[in-house]
Image (tube, rainbow, N blue to C red):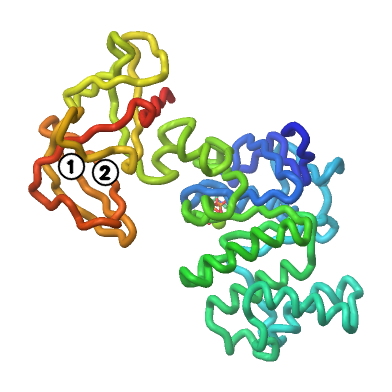
């Protein structure tokens, strides 16, 4: 457990297999009070299975799940102070939007003004005021997803587990809902565990991101740390765009890369002769006509609105990605010969 921040929910060495598939492989994880934690990883890496074990819909083969100080491993879902929104959520088709959101609250015994206020508040968060009387079939896919989210929020559990809650929303609504959700954890005092396979969403929302692959957590850290100090190649590659070159440590604390035909300095002190991978983010690489580390030819330019990615082919075979803000006129075109450099501090040496 981290210093000073008590865990609201803790999974300890949890494993779950389905036949020959190990869906979750000895995972340990703390969710802190009021924390917004994102689970990020490729399809099939075990995100939903981990969430289902937190909620109690799946029993781990081994390991334990704690909420506060209580061992809840054998506690059924309805008796846990958590609420889960499923990836394939189902609304009650015969009930109105308000009826759907109110359902769980009525089961808790809430009535009258208190009930109405909670329903209204939850619908306001997901921007569905005014649609309370509609039935699910009268809503768009994104609106239905927001009703499912409101239904979870209204219950105000200690921990909210959301499986891809914003997947059906368009970019603008998605961004607004992201901001609303992150603000809610302070206002309502709840912790969030949110599954996404969108790294931008994870970066925008999370206090910490757990990057998963094949049932394991590769790294869990705040977004900036994951981006700037990825623990290994998989995290570096999954979290943002990156150049990764294989190389060998040579004298002078440099890494020689065959594909780039150069040796460049690194800050990490490494034994001469060791094989490493050097990672440099595209936005850390500058175009330069003086003191270039190497030169190459622009083979492609991908326009991305605020920025463009330049693909620069080097004579040694490597293609280097360079990102530039589009605040000025586009400086280079396909076929241009360019010089590239990067500061030593931009090189992250990956050893695993
Ligand atoms: N009930 C089940 N029976 C058999 N295999 C399962 C079951 N549930 C999940 N799996 C398998 O366990 C692995 C992890 O599945 P899980 O649903 O947790 O992945 P995920 O990370 O949520 O993926 P996605 O991003 O596609 O939703 C997959 O290989 C999946 O096929
Ligand atoms: Mg899933």
Left or right: 352, with 93 as reference point: left
Q: Quadrant of residue 242?
A: top left
Q: Can residue 21 be seen in the rendering of this structure? A: no
Mark 1 C-beta closer than 8 Å to ligand 1: no
- Location of the C terminus (image quadrant): top left
Q: Residues within 10 Å of mark 1 (few under 14, many from 20)?
A: many
- Location of the N terminus (image quadrant): top right
Find residue 79 and report its horizontal and vertical position in percent.
85, 57
**Vertical placement of residue 31 versus 108, above or below:** above
Find residue 155 and report its horizontal and vertical position in percent.
79, 67
**Vertical placement of residue 88 versus 28, above or below:** below
Q: Viewer-proximal residue, 188 or 43? A: 188
Q: Secondary structure at mark 1?
A: strand
Find residue 251 and report its horizontal and vertical position in percent.
28, 8
Q: Report the number of discs.
A: 2
Q: CA distance from mark 2 to mark 1?
A: 7 Å
Q: Viewer-proximal residue, 31 or 19? A: 31
């Amino acid at each position: 457990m981290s210093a000073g921040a008590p865990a609201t929910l803790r999974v300890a060495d949890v494993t779950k297999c389905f036949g020959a598939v190990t869906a979750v492989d000895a995972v340990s994880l703390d969710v802190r009070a009021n924390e917004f934690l994102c689970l990020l990883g490729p399809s099939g890496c075990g995100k939903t299975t981990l969430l289902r074990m937190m909620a109690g819909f799946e029993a781990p083969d081994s390991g334990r799940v704690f909420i506060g100080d209580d061992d809840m491993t054998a506690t059924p879902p309805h008796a846990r102070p958590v609420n889960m929104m499923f990836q394939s959520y189902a609304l009650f088709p015969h009930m109105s939007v308000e009826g759907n959101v109110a359902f769980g609250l009525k089961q808790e015994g809430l009535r009258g003004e208190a009930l109405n206020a909670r329903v209204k508040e939850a619908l306001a968060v997901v921007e569905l005021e005014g649609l309370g009387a509609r039935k699910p079939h009268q809503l768009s896919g994104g609106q239905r997803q927001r009703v499912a989210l409101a239904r979870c929020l209204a219950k105000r559990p200690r921990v909210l587990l959301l499986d891809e809650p914003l997947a059906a929303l368009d970019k603008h609504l998605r961004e607004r809902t992201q901001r609303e959700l992150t603000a809610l954890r302070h206002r309502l005092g709840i912790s969030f565990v949110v599954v996404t396979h969108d790294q931008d969403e994870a970066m925008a929302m999370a206090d910490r991101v757990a990057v998963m692959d094949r049932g394991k957590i590769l790294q869990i850290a705040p977004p900036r740390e994951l981006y700037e100090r990825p623990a290994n190649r998989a995290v570096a590659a999954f979290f943002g765009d990156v150049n990764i070159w294989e190389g060998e440590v040579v004298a002078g604390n440099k890494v020689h890369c065959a594909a780039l035909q150069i040796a460049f300095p690194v800050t990490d002190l490494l034994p001469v002769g060791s094989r490493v991978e050097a990672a440099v983010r595209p936005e850390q690489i500058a175009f330069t006509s003086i003191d270039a580390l190497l030169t190459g030819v622009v083979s492609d330019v991908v326009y991305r609105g605020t920025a463009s990615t330049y693909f620069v082919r080097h004579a040694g075979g490597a293609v280097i990605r360079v990102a530039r803000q589009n605040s000025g006129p586009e400086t280079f075109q396909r076929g241009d010969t360019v010089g590239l450099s990067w500061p030593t501090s931009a090189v992250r040496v990956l050893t695993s």
